[in-house]
Image (cartoon, rainbow, N blue to C red):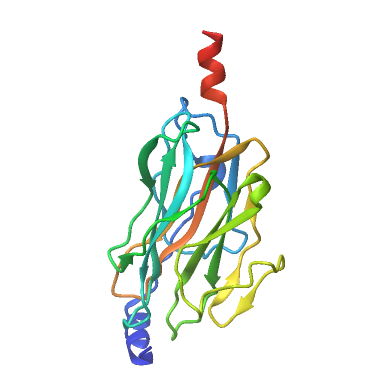
Amino acid sequence: MEKGFFLFVVLIGLAVAKAQKDEDLTLPEEVKISQYLNLDNGFDAGEWGPVSLCPNGTFAYALEVKYEDDDDVDETAVNAIKLYCGDEAGGDFGYVTSSEGQMGFWNGMRNCSDSFLMGMRGLVVEYQGLFEDDVAVDNVQMMCYNGTNGTDILTGVYDDDLEPDIDDDDDNDDDDGTWSTWALCDPGSAICGIQTRYESPSLMDDVAIADFTMFCCPMGTKNEMEEEE
């Protein structure tokens, strides 16, 4: 990374972004949210984008990450996250996403083999200082519970330098950042939506996706409501 570039942008000035707090979220009433999943090491930059939820009665069974490789002057790494939605009968209901950055490419779907997504964590690079390039979210992992088949771990970006030891329950520190603690939906619920915090491109150093929140919904709720009618 060219240090002269960051000296230039620092002389221009600093921008301060405010984060939207959980209690400020406005969620659709027709979708029952049972839980928020948050990173415990999110990066403090950018603004929260829209909340995007799977249709009522559907849940996320796959993810896809948009990622910019480290070959640019201002590396931004993760630029967006998609969640693909399906119902318990196996139907496909498209995907949801929140803010999307301009850089990078989609890396392909990572699917649960026979279940829905029920946990998540992020690899986040901490603040690097005024004269170094900030990256923020550098990878995403999600967890599926597959009954007697055990647990599946889905990694958004396949890269030897970004792969953690998935059997290590502790925070995983390396040169590419720190993995957050696993955030898991309660039993009987699954991930059903997402909101990302995004820093837009500017003359200054920007990071694209800086933080994200996912939402859990109780499974079986829609069918139970229909049976009551």
Location of residue 26 in the rendering, given as x and y in whole percent from the top left corner? 46, 35
Q: Residue at x 38, y 91 (%)?
A: 3
Extreme top residue here?
A: 229
Extreme front residue here?
A: 148
Q: In terms of depth relative to the viewer, which is nearer, 149 or 71?
A: 149
Location of residue 53 in the rendering, given as x and y in whole percent from the top left corner? 43, 39
Q: Residue at x 46, y 71 (%)?
A: 158
Height in image: 135 above or below 122? below
Q: Residue at x 61, y 39 (%)?
A: 35
Q: In terms of depth relative to the viewer, which is nearer, 169 or 179?
A: 169
Location of residue 52 in the rendering, given as x and y in whole percent from the top left corner? 41, 42
Q: In terms of depth relative to the viewer, which is nearer, 3 or 121?
A: 121
Height in image: 23 above or below 46? above
Left or right of 114: which side holds 91? left
Left or right of 162: which side holds 204? left
The quarter of the rendered structure image containing the N terminus is bottom left
Location of residue 200 in the rendering, given as x and y in whole percent from the top left corner? 33, 63
Q: Is residue 45 in view?
A: yes
For the image shown, how many numbered marks are present on the structure? 0
Height in image: 194 above or below 174? above
Q: Is residue 51 in view?
A: no
Residue 132 is drawn in which quadrant? Answer: bottom left
Height in image: 130 above or below 42? below
